[in-house]
Every structure is written in C-alpha cells, then in structure tokens.
Amino acid sequence: MNGWIDLHIHSNYSDGLAAPQEILELVRQKGLSAFALCDHDNVQGYFKIKELLRKDDPELIPGVELSAGGDVDDIHILGYFFDPYSEVLNDALEVFRKRRNSRGEKMLLKLKDMGITVPLELVLEIAGHSAIGRPHVADALLRVGAISTYESAFGRYIGNNCPAYVAKDNMIPEEATDLIHQVGGLAFLAHPGIGNAESYIEQLAHAGLDGIEIYHPNHSTYQIKMFAEMAKNYKMLVSGGSDYHGREGRFGMIGAQKVPSDILINMKQKLEKNRGCH
C-alpha cells in the first residue's frame, strides 16, 4: 500500500460539520490510500460512506471514538477494524448517545439559571444526526446572541470548570478498550498530548491497549518521537490522523498529517495474530 492515510476524521454524525459524502470527496481530493471516520459514539456515518464507495476509492476502515475517564481527565479511546454491525457495540453506542443528550440538557438548565435561554429544539436542530456535544451548545449560544465568538462559549460558559459545564458520564478507559476488543477491534489512545491523557499510557498498556495515536495536529515533532518511543517500549502500535472537524480552530484538515500507510499493515498483522489466538 502506497501513499498517506488519515485515521481520525469526524462527520456531522458527531461534532464535525461535514456530511459523510463531503468527507469522501475530500479524501478523494487528497489522494489518500485509506481513511477512518471516527465519530464519537456513532458508526452511522461509516455506513453512509460505505454505500457511496467506488471500486477505485481509498480503503475505508471502521472507526469510532469513545470518551472515557471521570471528572478530572477526559480520555478518548479510538477503535478500529471492529465489527460495525455488532449488536453489542451498537447497543452500547446508543446508551452513550443518550448520556450525551442528557448532559447537553443539563448544560442548558445551568445556562438558564444564569439568565441565558437556549432552546433545546435549537440545539437538537444544530446537532442533526449527532447526539448533543459541547460544540452544538456553543453554536446555539452564538445563534441566540449570548456570545460573539464560538470560542468564547468554552472560555466563559461550557469549558471545563466553567459555570455551565457538566462532566460526562463516562466509562473508564479500560472498559472502552474492552468493548472494542469484544467486537473484534483494536483500541488506541487518542491524542495523548492533549490534557492528561499521556499519564494513562502505562496503565492502559498493561490493560491491553493496542496502540497510541502519535500523529496529531496538536503534537509537536518532539511529542511524535516521544510517543513513538513509548509505543515501542510497550510493544504497542501507532496510528494518526487529522482529527478533522471542519470547524475553525478544531485541529487539522483531512490529510494534513503525513501518516504513513505501513501503519495499516502493522494493524492488520496484529488483528490476524489476535484472531489466530482465539
């Protein structure tokens, strides 16, 4: 396999702005050899792209991003090559989406207590196919005129430790890793350079984590080398992607990270090895 790959893309089935068909067009334009849509708690965008694929299109990898961790740390686990049709997976994702919607409603109640009315109907309309995420609440705050810039929603109201913030009701990282393994996939720690995620690498390596996302727009060259070395020390794989959302200031453009395609070969070899052990 030649060329570059992008294994971390978001569509409007989570907190991205682009529809699945737009993502596919961007991937085609960039000449990538493979890509993965990793929407939060949702694989419906994957099915939409799969329906649109042509014979000569880049390889589409099943992907998902799961939130894990408690009030202090928001750890994200990326899943790849799992069975997207699995009832176990889809039932779990349905529960996670309901929790996200509940969290969104609680934020709106907190805002109301502060004298800011944001209609739930507006947030649901903005969220569209997705469960409610903070970017949707931020967009709604902008639309009702409560803020003048998108970023200020996080700085003043819904960012961590802000007055309208509500912590996610998450599973722990080990549970997220186990869920991905249960449905035949590989589990990777997303963007360890963001927040306190890096501190979980050792603990998750011992809990069966398959790899680390080393290539990410937020990672410096030094961090990429450091995380690659950590992955090597713990005998784990590496992955990477743009974390594309289509939102200004939210990470990179599709294909902007030069992620080598041999990463996929290593992932597939690990999968074969895992399946051979069962």
Image (cartoon, helix red, strand yellow):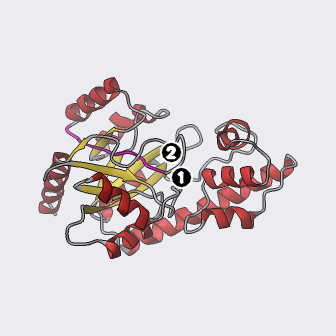
Amino acid at dot 1: Asn
- Residue that numbered label 2 is attached to: 69
Give coordinates of residue 15: x percent, y percent: 53, 55
Please give the name of the residue rendered at 32% of the width and 23% of the height, measured from the top-left corner: 222
Measure the C-alpha gap from mark 2 to mark 1.
6 Å
Q: Is mark 1 on a helix, strand or loop?
A: loop
- Quadrant for residue 43, please give it: bottom left
Mark 2 or mark 1: whose residue is earlier in sequence: 2
Please give the name of the residue rendered at 51% of the width and 43% of the height, measured from the top-left corner: 250
- Residue that numbered label 1 is attached to: 170
**Mark 1 and mark 2 in contact (Cβ < 8 Å)?**
yes
Q: Which circle marks residue 273 in the picture?
A: none
Please give the name of the residue rendered at 17% of the width and 56% of the height, measured from the top-left corner: 268
Q: Nearer the viewer, residue 90 or 142?
A: 142
Q: What element carries label 2?
A: loop
Q: In this view, does 237 lie to the left or right of 216?
A: left
Q: What stretch is highlighted in magenta?
A: 235-245
Q: Which of 61 and 246 is in front in this view?
A: 246
- Quadrant for residue 125, please give it: bottom right
Give coordinates of residue 155: x percent, y percent: 68, 36
Residue 20 in magenta stretch: no
Q: Is the magenta stretch mostly helix, strand or loop?
A: loop
